[in-house]
Amino acid sequence: MRDFLRGNIRRITLLVIVGAFSLSFSGKIKEVVKGESTCVCAYDGYGYYMYLTQFFQYRNLNFKQNELQAVQDKHCEGAVVYQLHTVENGNALDIYHMGQAYLELPAYTVGHLFAKIGGYPKDGFSKPYHIAFLLNALLFILLGIYFLNKILRLFFADHISALVLLIVYFGTNFWVTAVHGYQLQHIYLFTLIAALFYYLLKVRETKKNKHLILAALVLGIISSVRPTHALLGILPLLMLRKVYPSSWAYWKAILLFPLAGLLFNLPQMIYWKVMGGNWFILNMHVEEVIITDPHIFDFLFSYKKGWLLYSPVFLLLIPGFVQLYRQRKAFFWPVFGSLLLLIWIFASWECWWYAASFGSRAMVDLYPLLALPLGFGLVYLTKTRMRRAATMIFVVCTLALSVFQSEQFSIGYLHPDRMTKAHYWYIFGKLSMPDYQVNRLEIDRSNTTWPEKIQPEKLGFGKLEQLLFCEVNNRKSPAGTSTLLVKKPYFPTLKTDETRFEAEIIYQNQDSLLPGTIKFEAFSKYNTYDWKFYSLPTQKRAGETDTLLVRFNLPRINHTADKIQVYIENPGKKDIIVHKLKIKALSLIRN
């Protein structure tokens, strides 16, 4: 029996992994068949999928906010449509790229065919589409397993390959990302990057053009799914350097990659040109990629979404990269260079925590590359009995932690967006908490009553601190103008963005028909990313004052130098006099 297990350890591991994902997705399909699940996709996932629903239903890509919201209201209760951006010509463009729609198109076509045959609504959300969508996601997970297995077999013995497979699929955030975030890009990009890496390895091994062409086509698709991943062009640049006999042959091979990128991005460019008026529209998101101000430490280590905090098994990459450099330097620089470059880009996104996820979901894309140094690290660390014992204890503990925390995520204890140090340790090691509390989470920025609820001093994780943020007196906003009242950095006056502002405005406004507005905007030197505005109505007699009292929570502040600006927009025919604007801040100061 022992000999059988040793001889078939890799195959058994593959069967376990394939079986686990198949069982999970069969459960999801059963829910669809029973009518318990009706939402094919929402939020970011709908941003990719709507290209298909719009084109198949209306034969155009002229999106309408009200139509899309009606679809989400019908099938995905509570999901808000935010995926459109209105450009100068008045058209509403999808802010997401269409590359993932290419990957979903075959399944959509099959679902459309079965909907037509079975008499289901041909709207992209009836049962045949939903089942096809889930099967397509499962297919890409299985393809990712296939390519990763083929990569590992090129380098490692079966027992190391089996261990790497277990680590990647169960010892990281891959499981949660695949099972709960299958609507998103990551399982697709994981598979595509695994295929790209495999075909590049085969080019080095065989020098066959078919592998080169396949690698170029795969990278082209990757760039159409997530344009920043075009940076993975560093892989062929470095991996193929010494493959070809001449510089001309090398550059001719490399040229295939940008040509493939152009091929798969051309439909996107045509869409932008026809609907938006420009061949290139670089970014329609509120957030920007600011490479001069990356959140590296938070991205890697924070309790909110730190990649290494929630997937600590990747600490094995430290000895792994050392061994890769010593033994296979030709692969060290492509993999290590790609990792550094993309971590920098991922951490430079102003929404560096990537919304709802377990750990950093952006990193899942790169796991096929990281499997290589991971394997080399395991080979080195298991050479002696003592190192092998210590390594296996570490691997088993991190695997157990990941599985445990994945279950905490599934039942709602491990929050997808608002984790903190206090909450992490509050739920640590627990799957049943009858008196479970959310007080320790990052503040709920949609609710201004949080200071009255969280009791930080009683629960021992912090304190509430109040201060006067700013005060201005006797400002006039002339008729028909905008007048700046305040422009001030948040920090260092504030210690944290977990803060509620209370603004008191005492003003005189004699135009009851066009009362004017006071606006509070959070902005950086790159963009304005949050705004709140309140009307300044009046029912008073001439010379009398009105008082407006408003409360609002700060957004997550993107950069330490960001500021608030407060100004009056006065469209009326009479001046608005602000006798006093007083802003008090109530902050949660954590231990």
Image (cartoon, rainbow, N blue to C red):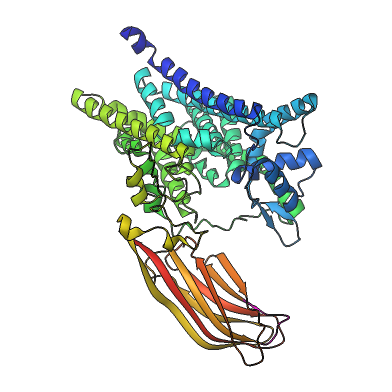
User: What type of secondary structure mainly makes up the magenta span?
Assistant: loop
Q: Nearer the viewer, residue 268 or 162?
A: 162
In the displayed orientation, state which residue is furthest to the left.
386
Can residue 270 be seen in this snapshot?
no
Q: Nearer the viewer, residue 414 or 396?
A: 414
In the figure, 290 relative to 59: above or below? below
Q: Position of residue 531 (x, y in %)?
A: 57, 67
Q: Position of residue 256 (x, y in %)?
A: 60, 37
Magenta-highlighted residues = 510-517
Can residue 320 be seen in this snapshot?
yes
In the displayed orientation, state which residue is furthest to the bottom.
543
Q: Residue at x 55, y 88 (%)?
A: 475
Query: Is 515 part of what is drawn in magenta?
Result: yes
Q: Position of residue 20 (x, y in %)?
A: 48, 23
Q: How many marks?
A: 0
Q: Nearer the viewer, residue 93 or 443?
A: 443
Is residue 432 rendered to the left or right of residue 137? left
In the displayed orientation, state which residue is furthest to the front.
434
In the figure, 445 relative to 465: above or below? above
Query: Is 364 part of what is drawn in magenta?
Result: no
Q: Quadrant of the N terminus?
A: top left
Question: Residue 529's quadrant in the figure?
Answer: bottom right
Is residue 373 rendered to the left or right of residue 292? left
Q: Position of residue 193 (x, y in %)?
A: 51, 34
Question: Residue 242's quadrant in the figure?
Answer: top left
Q: Quadrant of the C terminus?
A: bottom left
